[in-house]
Amino acid sequence: MSHTPIECVRVLSIHEHPKADRLEIVKILGTQVCSPAGDFNVGDLAVYFPPDMLIPEETAEKLGVKNYLKHAVYPGHLLKSQCRIGAVRLRQVPSVGFLLKFEKMNMREGDDLTNKFKGAKYNPPMQNMRSGLLASDTEYFPKYTAIQHYYRHVDCLPEGVPVRITEKIHGCVKTGTRVRMADGTSKFIQRIQPGEYVAGMVDGKIVPSKVLQVFQNGSSMDWLKIQFKRERCGRGNSFGSVTCTPNHQFFIDGSYSDASTLRLGDKLSVLRSDWRLSHIQEQILLGKMLGDGHLSAGIMSAHIAWGHVSKDLTDWTAMGLGDLHNKRGGDRQLSGYGSLMHRARTHNSVFILDKFESFIKDGRKIIPDWVIDKLTPLAIAFWYMDDGSLSHHSGQEDRAHFAVCGFTETDCQILIKALKKYCITAIYYRDPMGYSRLRLNADEAEKLFLLIVPYIPDSLQYKLPKRYRGHTGWLPSTEDSYKTDLVSQTITSITPIVQSSPRWDLETETHNYMPSNVVTHNSNSRVGLIGGLYWPDRRFMCGTHRTNRREFDQAGRRSLYWQPMTKPMEDMLETLYVLHANYMAFDSVTVYGEIFGTKVQAMDYGVEGAMGYRVFDIAVGGEFLDWKDVKRFCDYHKIPTVPLLYEGPFRAALVDELMNGPTTVCGEEEIRCSFKGREGIVVTPLEEQYDEELQDRLILKAVSPDYYSAMN
């Protein structure tokens, strides 16, 4: 991650603002800000506040800049405030961050003042995807270099060093469209901020998905209003609609399709309006939490895991939960007593977190008071199958016990009150061995058995008196699930609309979100071949620059990040591996590139309904190849590389000349998003170099002020 602190800088030059007499363009480091005329002189020291830094709202007020800041959540705060520094255009001239003069402050050029102003970097980390889309990463599949900003390290590239300068490739719906958030609420798309969580979809399951970027892509006159029936989809009208641009993508029959290709009768995947746990799921999970269930909670969601020596009970629980059961979450392992346990778990869900987080206090499982009112026979049945036992002695009527060793006596009193609702009297006691039990005498046990017997499968009926055995047990069918999260809805009309309105889009960690409850699509790439002593079977890997991804999801769909792994790419990786591999130890070949197009992000680079790909670096055994070798291998295997803007001796003036301007990936007329320029440039020596100041390989980026202004 690049380091962009709040720091003391020197004013390098001052220029007249072409369209505002009261403003001047102040050049500092390798960038510029617009400031009131007369505030600065060449050579002055000032404090530079760069884009995408956060400062506390109270600090912003003291500095007098609060009204110029964007909304975000400052670290440690719960609510949003005006704390995020951005980039804007002031009378059409980009101003990247802002500059303030502090005459009484004792500071020197280059001083890092981030802590003094309580600054924090605004760069939301990518969270792990749910449902197993992330694969285990390995140090032998090297992550990409954290590229630093040129404007902070201008001395690292002396004049005359042979360099290559390449274009940096960046990897909609109407204003007023509501997007479903991860907590079940909805929010206007224009009010959503990076770092928030929306509802996303992975393997057909609804999961919290972090918003990585929000795009305001200018205005459009070209819209489609797509209407669909709303049947068995929760409360609300009998029809729904979403208005979008023709290239916006929707999830249709297992894949994403442009709105312009949709036809009447196509089936959209729509999230039900009353999305939540069903009553059956809630009660089964309540029973598991009273028994052997374990809650694993994250920031926005949680899952419940369970295990039993009886595989039938594990499977019976999974069957009752239906699509909430995570089919990938099960395994077998030995318990502390040496018995084989069959384990399973749910998917992650915000509603599991909301409902069951009260079961955990100070790291210990407790019984919350609400159990008294919410416990039903279905929950009691699953609790009994986990921790209940039949007490049978010759000459006595059958009795029942619940093992409650993990709970305090206070917790057990709550359980006793909950059972009392069903006229079942339980007594708390500790046996001579120190084990805690809830004991039911014969009359009370009979009441219990009458309540729970329908839900006990044949293999668990040894816990029932003989007179209650011999049936198969009953749970509702999951083939026609009650209130499934996603419901197929039929498109009934598609109407073109000519109306000027701003275009909005989100980039999320699951690459989808739900405007008007409809599943819609919204990236860098790392592909490699690893092998050697520790990996005797060579294998391909793919992912982002920071995470490793599985090739196929649960439905058999190939991951976006595996799309660059074509036959030419496999051949190039194999060739490089054979030429460079050290068979006595370990080696790897990693290709770094950018995936782009309408299926990936808002900046489409002229790619419609498909995906583009460009390579910009190759590493063998963690060592990066010189650019001539990258080009030689990619050209031979006909794999495209990022556009080369310049190759030759470095001049500082080249940075300003080349970081702005139109993209060279395609013609301007092919681009459909509002911003048709380039994101910036990347400068790298033609021969790989290590830099002491960077403590890394020498590679620097310069982001276009026009891009900052358009995208912030």
Image: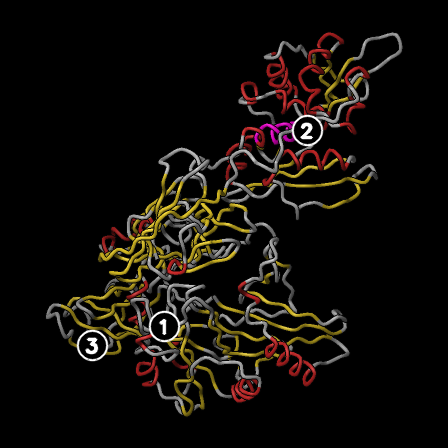
Q: State the residue in front, 648 or 156.
A: 648
Q: Are marks 1 and 2 in contact (CB under 8 Å)?
A: no
Q: Quadrant of residue 430?
A: top right
Q: Which residue is mark 1?
A: 679
Vertical arrangement, residue 347 with respect to residue 382, above or below: below
**What amino acid is at disc 2?**
Gly
Please tell me in which quadrant of the rendered image residue 26 appears: bottom left
Local secondary structure at mark 1: loop
| Residue 401 within the magenta-colored segment of the rendering | no
For image coordinates 77% across by 39% down, the residue present is 341
What is the C-alpha distance between the residues marked 2 and 3?
71 Å
Residue beneath disc 3: 14
Q: Which residue type carries mark 3?
A: Ile
Give residue 410's position: percent from left, percent from top. Answer: 62, 19
Q: Which residue is mark 2?
A: 291
The amino acid sitting under disc 1 is Glu
Element at label 2: loop
